Image (spheres, helix red, strand yellow):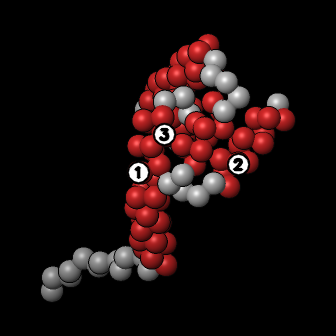
Amino acid sequence: MEKIKKIGKQFANDRPGERFINLHRTLHSGGHKVLVSIAGVVGGVVLMIGGLILGFIPGVPGVVLGVLGLALIAAQIPILAKWCDRWEPILRGVLKKCRAAISRNKNNPPIEEKPLELK
């Protein structure tokens, strides 16, 4: 359990654009175990399917499970880890712009239009 916490902290502290390939290297540095890799991929697929199903339920953030599943799979497959590292900074930039737009709209609510009165 302590090893999982240590790996999680390392993943969280790594720079965006490097964290997935670093996670892959960390997990496979002590010798590659095929059963662990298969379990990681199967677990990731289960999380992604669960996220997809929960995405249809209002108020439940199924995206979180999907992202965790993708991260779990990327930790096992180096090509996918590189793909995630390439797209993470781009997606972070898009999310930052979306958050800024949302906060601007919250600070400046739309002006209420009054119906025209005919005399």
Question: For numbered disc 2, what is the local secondary structure?
Answer: helix
Question: For numbered disc 3, what is the local secondary structure?
Answer: helix
Residue pushed farthest left?
A: 119
* 111 or 64: nearer the viewer: 64
Q: Give the CA separation, mark 3 to mark 2.
A: 15 Å
**Badge 2 is on which residue?**
10
Closer to us: mark 3 or mark 1?
Answer: 3
Nearest to N terminus: mark 3 or mark 1: 3
Question: For numbered disc 1, what is the local secondary structure?
Answer: helix
* 100 or 23: nearer the viewer: 23
Name the residue located 49 percent from the left edge and 78 percent from the top edge: 107
Residue pushed farthest right?
A: 2
Amino acid type, callout 2: Gln
**Badge 1 is on which residue?**
87
Q: Give the CA separation, mark 2 to mark 1.
A: 19 Å
- The mark tally for this picture is 3
Name the residue located 82 percent from the left edge and 31 percent from the top edge: 1
Q: Which mark is residue 81?
A: 3
Amino acid type, callout 1: Trp
Side (left or right) of 8 relative to 119: right
